[in-house]
Image (cartoon, helix red, strand yellow):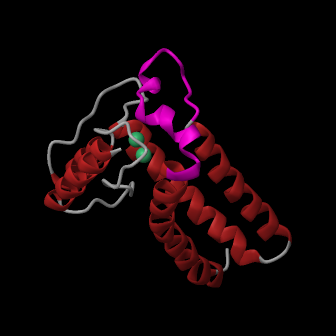
C-alpha cells in the first residue's frame, strides 16, 4: 500500500478516536442521562447482573456501530476520509468495549480489577458513576478519561444533594 495513504489517514483515525471521548461524554450527559434515560436506566439498575445477556442500554452501542458502518460505507463510495473517521469511531468502540463492558462491568467470563495506575483510576471513577442509580448524575461521564478523585467526590456529593431536594 502507498505510504501516502497511511500518512494522511492514520492521523484521521487517531484524531477521530480521540474526539469520540468528548463526544461520548456529551451523549452520556445530555442524551443518556437526559431524554434517553429510558434506555440508559437499565445500565444503572444493574439489570446486566441478571442472567440476561443484554440490557436495553446496549441499544446505544448498536446506534454508534450503525453510524460507524454508514460512515465507512459512504466513505468507500464517495468521500474517502469519511471511511477513516468510521475506523476511528470503531477503534474507540473497541477500546470502550474492553474497558467499560469488560474491565469495569465484567461482562466477560473472568474478573480482572486493575490494582494501580491509570486503569485503576478509570475503574474507580466509573464505579462512582454507578454509585447512583438516578438520572441526575454528573460524576465521571467520560469513559476513557477520568477527572481527579477529589473532583469526582465533590460532584458525587453535589448530586446527592440535588437528588435529596427532588
Ligand atoms: Zn450513566
Ligand atoms: Zn457503566
Q: Residue furthest top?
A: 51
Residue 55: quadrant of the picture: top right
Q: Is residue 112 magenta?
A: no
Above or below: residue 56 compared with residue 145: above
Q: Nearer the viewer, residue 30 or 58?
A: 30
The front one of 150 and 112 is 150
Residue 33: % across, % down: 48, 50
Residue 128: image location, x then y, percent:
26, 44
Whether residue 23 sits left or right of residue 49 in the image: it is: right
Q: Position of residue 67 (x, y in %)?
A: 70, 57
Which residues fall within the magenta stretch?
A: 34-56
Q: Is residue 39 magenta?
A: yes
Indicate the position of residue 32 as horizontal and vertical percent values: 52, 49
Side (left or right) of 61 relative to 102: right
The picture quadrant where one finds residue 108 is top left
Quadrant the N terminus occupies: bottom right
Amino acid at each position: 500500500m502507498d505510504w501516502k495513504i497511511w500518512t494522511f489517514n492514520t492521523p484521521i483515525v487517531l484524531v477521530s478516536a480521540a474526539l469520540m471521548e468528548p463526544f461520548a461524554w456529551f451523549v452520556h450527559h445530555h442524551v443518556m442521562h437526559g431524554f434517553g434515560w429510558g434506555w440508559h436506566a437499565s445500565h444503572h439498575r444493574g439489570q446486566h447482573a441478571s442472567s440476561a445477556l443484554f440490557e436495553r442500554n446496549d441499544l446505544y452501542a448498536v446506534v454508534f456501530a450503525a453510524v460507524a458502518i454508514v460512515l465507512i460505507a459512504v466513505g468507500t463510495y464517495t468521500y474517502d476520509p469519511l471511511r477513516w473517521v468510521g475506523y476511528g469511531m470503531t477503534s474507540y468502540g473497541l477500546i470502550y468495549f474492553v474497558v467499560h463492558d469488560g474491565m469495569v462491568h465484567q461482562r466477560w467470563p473472568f474478573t480482572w480489577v486493575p490494582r494501580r495506575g491509570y486503569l485503576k483510576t478509570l475503574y474507580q471513577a466509573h464505579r462512582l458513576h454507578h454509585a447512583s442509580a438516578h438520572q441526575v448524575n454528573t460524576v465521571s461521564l467520560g469513559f476513557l478519561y477520568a477527572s481527579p478523585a477529589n473532583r469526582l467526590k465533590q460532584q458525587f456529593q453535589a448530586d446527592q444533594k440535588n437528588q435529596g431536594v427532588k
